[in-house]
Image: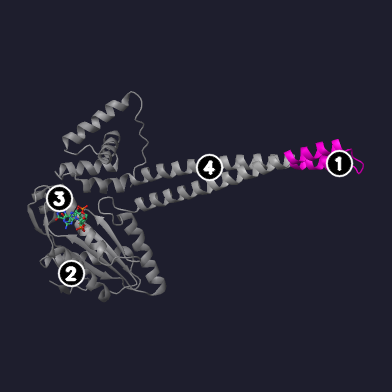
Amino acid sequence: MALDLDISLRGPDAYALTRKAVDQMEQHQVWPTPLNYELWIHYVNSPESDLASEINTLVKKRQPITEAVSEDLAARYLTRNRLSEEIRDAGDQLSRELASVTEALEKAQETNAAYGRTLAGASKDLTIDQEPPALKRMVETLTAATKRVQRENSNLEQRLNASTDEVERLRENLEQVRRDAMTDGLTNLANRKSFDEGLLSACAKSEAQNQPVSLAVIDIDHFKRFNDTWGHQTGDQVLRYVASVIGRVGMKAPRLAARYGGEEFALIFPGETMDKVIPVLEEIREEIASRLLKRRSTDEDLGAVTISIGLAQREAGEGATLLVERADAALYASKRGGRNKLTTADASAVAA
Ligand code: C2E
């Protein structure tokens, strides 16, 4: 559950809270990045929260809090906060914009009304035997009033054009916020929230239109060992590498590739049977295994990374949870069967 905290970093307690957060970060060997800083401020400020209890569990299990772990915690506990702040900011800007346009409209309305009054007065004063000087004054008054109203209308037009641009900019900002909220920061794939929504909607559509939907879950083999041996920064790069191959190999919409959790990925294939999907997954598996990676900092050979895959096709009446469970069970069959392979949910290993 996302945190709903409003921490005020002002006032006498602010420095103490900050020092406590930094101490904790140092103690647990977490870099003071802006993201970690935010997480640990929440941690020390709300020791009873779900976030704090999850961090405590990680610490107890001596599980390092890597960039990937922090991204995952932030996505689950902080997103709503950040999102609501950005939406609130955009809302404030929109209100200011509306107020300013309303003001310009009111001003133009006043000018138009005054112009109407001037015209009405002139038409009342106009007589057939008007003297030329009086007629001249009247024409001058009307000309000045017409110029004023033209100026005001042109100002209004400019203001409305500027406002249209501003509203378009805000719309793009909000679209970016929406995209960020659905994206995993480390890998740039869809995040867990986006996956959950995507799978629910794919299952509902599959049921309504009697169409297939397939789901693949992918786990990086021996990732923990890899992390322990080469360090977490390299582990994070392996996650990025696997994600980049997944993204490269034919995952265009309506297909959806997501980071499902730590080193697990999930791929939704709406409207596609397992038979159609297997060659795509095999291509991903083979491409990942074929490349020898290097540790960027030292140029040491890291060897190849392999993945295990579980694949399931939705059965009539089946919900998202059961589909995920069957794909997960197939994944574990791949792991038990020696890894670097794909297993379909009917338990037959397709490739070794
Ligand atoms: P990145 O480091 O940000 O690299 C992005 C892309 O730039 C790579 O996409 C690749 O097309 C290119 N690139 C970067 N460095 C090199 C290089 O030294 N040689 C070559 N030939 N191309 C390079 P790609 O290959 O899809 O990798 C995506 C991400 O996966 C990388 O992001 C990095 O985080 C990770 N990765 C890929 N290969 C390795 C590797 O051998 N070692 C490590 N540590 N990470 C890797």
Residue 102, how many percent across, how many down?
60, 42
**Mark 4, residue position:** 97
Colour scheme shown: one colour
Cα separation, mark 2 vs mark 1, equals 91 Å
Q: Are marks 1 and 4 in contact (CB under 8 Å)?
A: no
Question: Foreground: 100 or 43?
Answer: 100
Residue type indicated by callout 3: Thr
Q: Residue furthest top?
A: 12
Cα separation, mark 4 vs mark 3, equals 47 Å
Q: Are marks 2 and 1 in contact (CB under 8 Å)?
A: no
Badge 4 or badge 3: first in the primary sequence: 4
**Residue at 26% across / 34% down in the picture?**
44
Residue 342's label in the rendered image is: 2
Residue type indicated by callout 4: Glu
Residue 322, how many percent across, how many down?
29, 65
Residue 118 drawn in magenta: yes
**Residue at 79% across / 42% down in the picture?**
119
